[in-house]
Image (cartoon, rainbow, N blue to C red):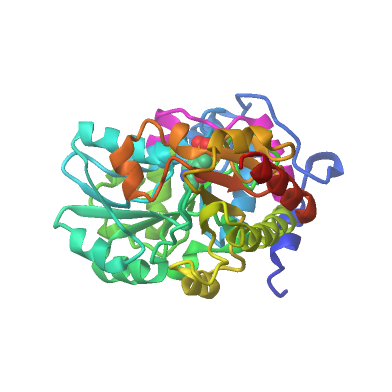
């Protein structure tokens, strides 16, 4: 049968595995341990010789169903879920890198990713941050001990787009592990596998869940990496096809040993949210493009950051690689506009962190999520004191424009 479309595949993926009692979606399994029929069975399951469930920190039926859905979404081989997106990022690199290794990362990063990469330096892992909108900067930073390259698709908050395809070619040519954080685009808008990514990370807390009611993270193995060339793998994990070895080590070291397990209840919320990912993400992106065009015409606004604008430095790249221009944007208010007064005047847009929620969320980034980073790193990332990030929701666009219009009028 022909491969199913994105939404059909997600909606029906639980049924494909057979669901208890004819349920239409996988139920929440809260049991943390699982009974085995015989001593031989429990031994075979624990030794990985037979499929089955061991202990809830490592594996759970509700989470496995979500992992299958995520593998379908990313067109990957297999997926491992975590309690949060940050857990997925930390566990992936802590499981795969060791002291003396070097990581090249985009400088345009989610704030907590930037923070944890700096923590890695305490453990002897070198990290170089580069402007990844040009693959030449990544190439120039490579060292003999470089093991991996990490980028986000569309960066937060100023929407820089990494040179995704050229970095993929570079990593392929050099045999380097290419890890892409796809949170901002979501697998509906973009599949990093298409540009040669080896591991795809998603914060499930954002567009994939969408309703702001569950935290989660995931790592998907695309099957494109030859793990037999990767030096840090434990011999005992090199069983079966080499394309799976990396995820095996992430599951054993990153999930089982470090223990940031996705709760079954959260997995269920995320799986339900994922059913409507294409509808929600597309609507948010359409709203964002309308808002970006509107803001660009307002005299109180110094700059508008959204890939839909022809003036965006990577507009052509976004058009080429992505299905839409994304639901995240930022505006920089002119210095004479009182940023806090503007935000306090908003009636519909919600003052909150998080992104990819159904509701439109706004946040003054220099004063909040990027406060700890300091003025120097902020300036490098293009963040001014008057920069407001807008995670555009799925409201009616006219209502959003009316809200921003009245707030700008009040802020002078
Ligand atoms: C939110 C986010 C994360 C972290 O995800 P959590 O689920 O909040 O831990 C990582 N990367 C990006 C790009 C994000 O937006």
Q: How many marks?
A: 0
Q: Could you say where residue 126 lies in the image, as x and y percent from the top left?
A: 20, 43
Q: Between 353 and 255, which is closer to the camera in this rendering?
A: 353
Q: Is residue 118 left or right of residue 10?
A: left
Q: Is residue 21 left or right of residue 12?
A: right
Q: Could you say where residue 44 lies in the image, as x and y percent from the top left?
A: 50, 37
Mark yes or no: residue 275 visible: no
Q: Could you say where residue 105 lies in the image, as x and y percent from the top left?
A: 31, 51
- Which residue: 58% across, 56% down? 299
Residue found at the very far right of the displayed protein = 22
- Which residue: 38% across, 55% down? 151
Q: Is residue 285 left or right of residue 302?
A: right
- Residue stretch in magenta: 252-275
Mark yes or no: residue 234 visible: yes
- Examine the image and state in which quarter residue 291 appears: bottom right
Classify the position of the N terminus by image quarter.
bottom right
Classify the position of the C terminus by image quarter.
top right
Indicate whether 130 appears above or below 164.
above
Decide whether residue 273 is among the magenta residues: yes
- Which residue: 37% across, 58% down? 242
Indicate whether 75 appears above or below 35.
below
Decide whether residue 34 is among the magenta residues: no
Q: Main secondary structure of the magenta part?
A: helix
- Which residue: 36% across, 49% down? 381
Q: Between 85 and 5, which is closer to the camera in this rendering?
A: 85
Q: Could you say where residue 261 lies in the image, as x and y percent from the top left?
A: 52, 31
Indicate whether 215 appears above or below 287.
above
């Amino acid at each position: 049968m022909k491969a199913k479309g994105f939404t059909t595949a997600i909606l029906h993926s639980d049924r494909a595995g057979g669901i208890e009692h004819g349920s239409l979606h996988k139920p929440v399994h809260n049991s943390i341990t699982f009974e085995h029929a015989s001593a031989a069975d429990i031994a075979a399951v624990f030794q990985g010789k037979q499929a089955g469930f061991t202990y809830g920190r490592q594996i759970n039926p509700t989470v496995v169903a979500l992992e299958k859905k995520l593998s379908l979404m990313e067109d990957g081989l297999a997926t491992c879920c975590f309690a949060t997106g940050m857990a997925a990022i930390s566990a992936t690199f802590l499981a795969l890198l060791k002291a003396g290794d070097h990581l090249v990362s985009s400088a345009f990063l989610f704030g907590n990713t930037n923070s944890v990469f700096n923590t890695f330096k305490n453990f002897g892992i070198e990290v170089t941050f580069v402007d990844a909108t040009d693959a030449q900067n990544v190439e120039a930073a490579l060292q003999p001990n470089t093991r991996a390259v990490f980028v986000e698709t569309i960066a937060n908050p100023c929407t820089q787009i990494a040179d995704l395809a050229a970095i993929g070619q570079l990593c392929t040519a050099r045999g380097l592990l290419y890890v892409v954080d796809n949170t901002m685009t979501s697998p509906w808008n973009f599949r990093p596998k298409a540009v040669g990514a080896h591991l795809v990370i998603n914060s499930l807390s954002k567009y994939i869940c969408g309703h702001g009611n569950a935290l989660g993270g995931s790592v998907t193995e695309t099957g494109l990496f030859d793990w037999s060339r990767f030096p840090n793998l434990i011999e005992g994990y090199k069983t079966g096809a080499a394309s799976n070895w990396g995820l095996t080590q992430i599951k054993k070291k990153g999930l089982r040993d470090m223990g940031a397990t996705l709760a079954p209840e959260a997995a269920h919320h995320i799986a339900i949210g994922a059913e409507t990912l294409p509808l929600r993400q597309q609507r948010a992106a359409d709203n964002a493009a309308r808002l970006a065009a509107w803001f660009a015409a307002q005299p109180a606004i110094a700059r508008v950051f959204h890939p839909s604008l022809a003036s965006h430095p990577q507009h052509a790249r976004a058009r080429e690689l992505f299905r839409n221009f994304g639901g995240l944007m930022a505006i920089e208010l002119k210095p004479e506009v009182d940023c806090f007064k503007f935000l306090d005047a908003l009636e519909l847009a919600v003052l909150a962190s998080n992104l990819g929620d159904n509701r439109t969320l706004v946040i003054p980034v220099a004063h909040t999520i990027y406060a700890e980073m300091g003025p120097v790193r902020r300036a490098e990332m293009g963040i001014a004191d008057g920069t407001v990030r807008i995670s555009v929701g799925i409201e009616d666009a006219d209502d959003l424009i009316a809200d921003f219009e009245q707030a700008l009028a009040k802020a002078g």
